Amino acid sequence: MNVSGGLALGVLAGGQGRRVGGRDKAWLARQGRSQLEHLLAMLPVGAFSERLASVRSDDPRWQAFGFRCVSDLRPGFGGPLAGLEALATASRSDRLLALPVDALDLPADLLPRLRAACTSDGAWLRDRSGLQPLIGLWRTSALRAAAASALDRGEHAVHRALAVLSPAELDISPAGVGNANTPADFDPT
């Protein structure tokens, strides 16, 4: 797939962090580095024309990593689908790689494999645990339209909202991505 109009990195980091005491997972440490640093280390350097983060509050630490922070466009907590809508609306790039900040083990070749698998509107990931709809490469305008339409209907499930785009599925089974969801996944504070 040719991404001539640029490729944005969109990190979903606007969750409420209930299982980690309300803390922001991006800045929790694992093995001495922030979760965001771990995520970025799994991605190719220089691959992105812009970096966006869907966040619950604008934290200046994001700018230190080259990110522009965006907030949900709708009142209340809309979940990850609202985060995807915000990322796609804010992006100036033709394509957007969406990732949750708490991803633990992305394949080293994730981006080229998603590009190779991608339909005109997108591709998402499947691993040994099943569909991972928060990990995907999307045509930005299609992602924005699908997310907005679903949210307008009251739909918040990402897999149902984005299925209308008929995305290709990159299956990395038997490997798994996993996510950092509990205090045990992070360094003691």
Image (cartoon, rainbow, N blue to C red):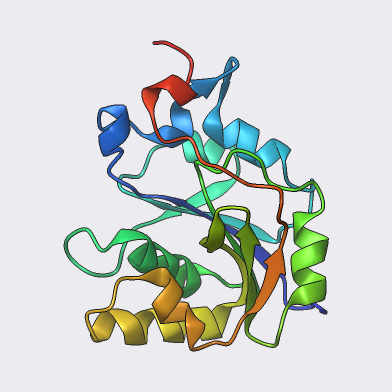
Q: Residue at x 79, y 78 (%)?
A: 4
Q: Quadrant of the N terminus?
A: bottom right
**x, y percent for residue 181:** 41, 36
* Rendered location of residue 71, percent (x, y): 34, 58
Vertical order, 149 against 155 (above or below): below
Residue at horizontal 30%, vertical 60%? Answer: 79
| Residue 94 visible to an observer of this rendering | no
121 sits left or right of 182 in the view: right
* Residue 141 image-quadrant placement: bottom right
Image coordinates for residue 22, horizontal then vertical, percent: 25, 33
Q: How many marks?
A: 0
Towards the viewer: 141 or 147: 147
The residue sitting at 43% across, 84% down in the picture is 146
Q: Quadrant of residue 112?
A: bottom right
Q: Quadrant of the C terminus?
A: top left
The image quarter in which residue 92 lies: bottom right
Q: Is residue 113 left or right of residue 104?
A: right
x and y percentages locating residue 30 in the rendered image: 55, 21
Position of residue 105 relative to residue 92, above or below, is above
Q: Residue furthest top?
A: 189
**37 or 89: nearer the viewer:** 37
The residue located at (62%, 46%) in the rendering is: 177
Q: Compared to 36, does 128 lie above or below?
A: below
